Image (cartoon, rainbow, N blue to C red):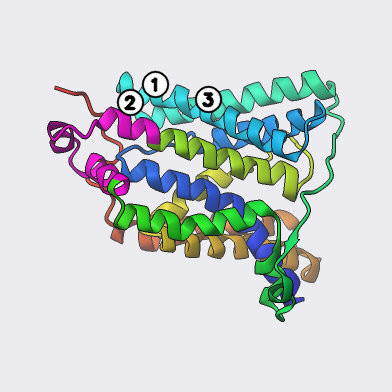
Amino acid sequence: MLEAFAASTVAMATPILLAALGELLVERAGVINIGIEGAMLTGAFAAIAAAHAGGGALAAVAAAVAAAVAINALFALVVVNLAANQVVAGTAIDLLALGVTGVLYQRIFGATGRAFTVAPMPPIALGPLARIPLIGPALFDQSALVYLAFALVPAIAWTLGRGRFGLRLRAAGERPEAADALGLGVYRLRWIALLIAGALSGLGGAYLSLAYANTFVEGITAGRGYVALAVVIVGRWNAWGVAAAALMFGAAMALQFVLQVSAGALPYQLFLALPYLLTVVVLAFVGGQAAAPAALGEPYVRG
């Protein structure tokens, strides 16, 4: 029972972690991307569409990354080059992705939305580590995307803490005028961060449709992009904190299934709301105490 819960926690946390790590880079550069939900949804759809067209797992993942990068490039054009309101633009991206994926889904799979399923991405067991009680199956018998998500945590932590690119990114998010005066190129840094975030959001979407659900349904992300935004705040804009927060929300999502089975008399909608209720509660206690990048959400116009 505990092994299954731990494995489910990691599975639930993986797409949130991938998206949140990308959002961490973006917010460190001074941009808040509400459109992360749309990028994940686009990636999830592109992955299943590529698989339906006969592509293998690698082609499906590549399609997810390309689609999510494209939608983030559109967002970058609007908010970086045209200095549009970031919250409004991100919300528009979410609505666009929801509408386009819904229309294309019915176009490809029929008006009734008949399900197309794919073989799940095979887990890769890491030898004796996978046989460790409790944590072995959860941490060391997972798909490649799970390993990639958790391997990115120390890489991004080092990049933001000590890497030249990460320090420049942080400068763009704290004092963009000063960074631009030093020739760091705020526009270029924010574009790069958004494109990387698009790739990670696409991977998160691909995980949902190829490794978790093994299919696509309209709105498959179910608010995970918004949870990823909360994870960045709860994690205090630190990669290790983001990973811990993603696991916490993953555990809440896994717990809802346990509660649905054990408390049969209560309506299941109550348990479905548990992760999102936790999001609101944690943000209420932690959000006001966290120090965001100074220029977060502020359009920058080179003057």
- Between 240 and 249, which is closer to the camera in this rendering? 240
Considering the numbered disc 2 on the image, is that residue within a helix, a strand or a loop? helix
Left or right: 220, with 73 as reference point: right
2 vs 3, front mark:
3
Residue beneath the point at 38% across and 63% down: 285
**Amino acid, disc 2:** Val
Give the number of the disc on residue 77. 1
- Going from the N terminus, do you reach mark 1 or mark 3 first? 3
- Residue interval drawn in magenta: 165-192
- Our reading of the magenta stretch's main secondary structure is helix
Q: How much space separates mark 2 and mark 3, taking CA atoms?
A: 15 Å
Q: Amino acid at mark 3?
A: Ala
Badge 2 crowding class, 10 Å Cα cut-off, few under 14, some 14 to 19, many 20 or more, is: many
Q: Position of residue 245 (x, y in %)?
A: 48, 62
Mark 2 sits on what residue? 80
The residue to which callout 3 is attached is 70
Q: Amino acid at mark 1?
A: Leu
Quarter assignment of residue 179 = top left
x then y, percent, for residue 145: 64, 51
User: Which residue is rendered at x = 68% and y = 30% of the image?
Assistant: 46
Which quadrant holds the N terminus?
bottom right
Neighbourhood count class around disc 3 (C-alpha, 10 Å): few under 14, some 14–19, many 20 upward: some
Nearer to me, 260 or 50: 50
